[in-house]
């Protein structure tokens, strides 16, 4: 029996295939001529905002509607994705304003005889507006990651320009003192470099920056160790005169960026002992070493000294 069925299919195979194709075409044509109603998620765009105002909150990106029409046109609308809902903001004013979402906000293509039968959600939006203001604010850059081992970020970042123009709502502008850039990745780097990086406006869609990016120089230098001898030890809060420290100076090994270490002066290093915390005769005490920012202590020789009361 299966052999007979197989032979039947082989007879006039091309004609049978064409018959099936034509039948499917006729079925598709008939079914897509029927009137149907389908849901669409349509992007919502805005236009007509007065130049003196800024929008403080963001409207929904999409609205859901139902469209009724021939199945053929509904299918074409879904495939082409040409539909957009446009919200006119020309009647906006300072404060909160309610806008109704209506079918006439959606313009269907000229070839479509379908129509928007229903607004599903949202049926309206509440938007907040403020007077536009502009002020100069400082730009602060930051980094992420670490340079290659043996190297260090050697000091502050240089931002050019350091001041930019920030535009936004007047009421919120008072709270803004500075803006940040996008973080700069310095992972594995070994030398100073300059890059262009985007400025990140404060949260909220009402702010914009001019310029939108700044030039940032990131100083990166090799880490070196240097020895400093004869650094004097200073006694703080001595209870009486004539107190001596032995030895009166120590040798320090400090670590930092090469450029900083080469210009470091002994006067910038502080070595002290606060006698307010001690009252015993002949104590062996550990001095406190304070180095400039970016410079760290590796070792001190000697580590403790003797104070004679």
Image (cartoon, grey):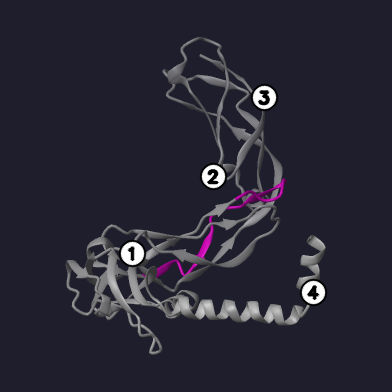
Q: Which residue is mark 4?
A: 10
Total numbered labels placed on residues in the image:
4
Marks 1 and 3, how far apart at CA: 69 Å
Dots 1 and 3: beta carbons under 8 Å?
no
198 in magenta? no
Q: Which residue is mark 1?
A: 60
Pick the front one: 232 or 159:
159
Q: Which residue is mark 2?
A: 293
- Residue 247: x %, y % from top left: 63, 24
Q: Which residue is mark 3?
A: 302
Q: Which residues are magenta?
A: 145-165
Give me the residue at 34% from left, 67% from top.
63
- Residue 258: x %, y % from top left: 68, 51
Question: Which image quadrant is residue 129 in?
Answer: bottom left
Vertical placement of residue 45 versus 199, above or below: below
Q: Earlier in the sequence, mark 1 or mark 4?
A: 4
Q: Earlier in the sequence, mark 2 or mark 4?
A: 4
Crowding at mark 3 (Cα within 10 Å: few <14, some 14-19, many 20+) = few
Discs 1/3, front: 1
């Amino acid at each position: 029996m299966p052999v007979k069925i197989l032979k039947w299919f082989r007879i006039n195979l091309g004609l049978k295939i064409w018959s099936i194709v034509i039948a499917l075409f006729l079925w598709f044509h008939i079914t897509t001529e029927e009137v149907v109603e389908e849901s669409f998620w349509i992007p919502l765009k805005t236009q007509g905002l007065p130049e003196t105002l800024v929008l403080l909150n963001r409207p929904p990106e999409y609205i859901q509607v139902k469209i009724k029409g021939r199945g053929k046109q509904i299918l074409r609308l879904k495939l082409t994705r040409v539909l957009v809902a446009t919200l006119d903001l020309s009647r906006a004013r300072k404060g909160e304003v309610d806008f109704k979402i209506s079918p006439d906000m959606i313009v269907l293509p000229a070839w479509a005889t379908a129509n928007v039968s229903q607004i599903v959600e949202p049926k309206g939006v509440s938007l907040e507006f403020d007077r536009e203001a502009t002020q100069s604010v400082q730009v602060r850059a930051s980094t992420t990651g670490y340079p290659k081992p043996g190297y260090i970020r050697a000091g502050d970042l240089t931002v050019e320009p350091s001041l930019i123009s920030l535009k936004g709502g007047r009421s919120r502008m008072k709270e803004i003192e500075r803006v940040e850039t996008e973080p700069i990745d310095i992972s594995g780097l070994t030398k100073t470099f300059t890059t262009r990086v985007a400025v990140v406006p404060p949260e909220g869609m009402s702010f914009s920056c001019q310029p939108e990016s700044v030039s940032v120089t990131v100083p990166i230098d090799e880490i070196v160790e240097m020895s400093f001898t004869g650094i004097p030890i200073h006694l703080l809060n001595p209870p009486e005169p004539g107190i001596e420290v032995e030895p009166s100076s120590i040798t320090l090994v400090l670590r930092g960026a090469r450029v900083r270490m080469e210009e470091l002066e002994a006067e910038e290093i502080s070595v002290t002992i606060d006698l307010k915390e001690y009252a015993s005769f002949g104590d062996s005490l550990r001095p406190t070493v304070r180095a400039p920012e970016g410079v760290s202590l590796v070792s001190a020789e000697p580590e403790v000294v003797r104070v004679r009361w």
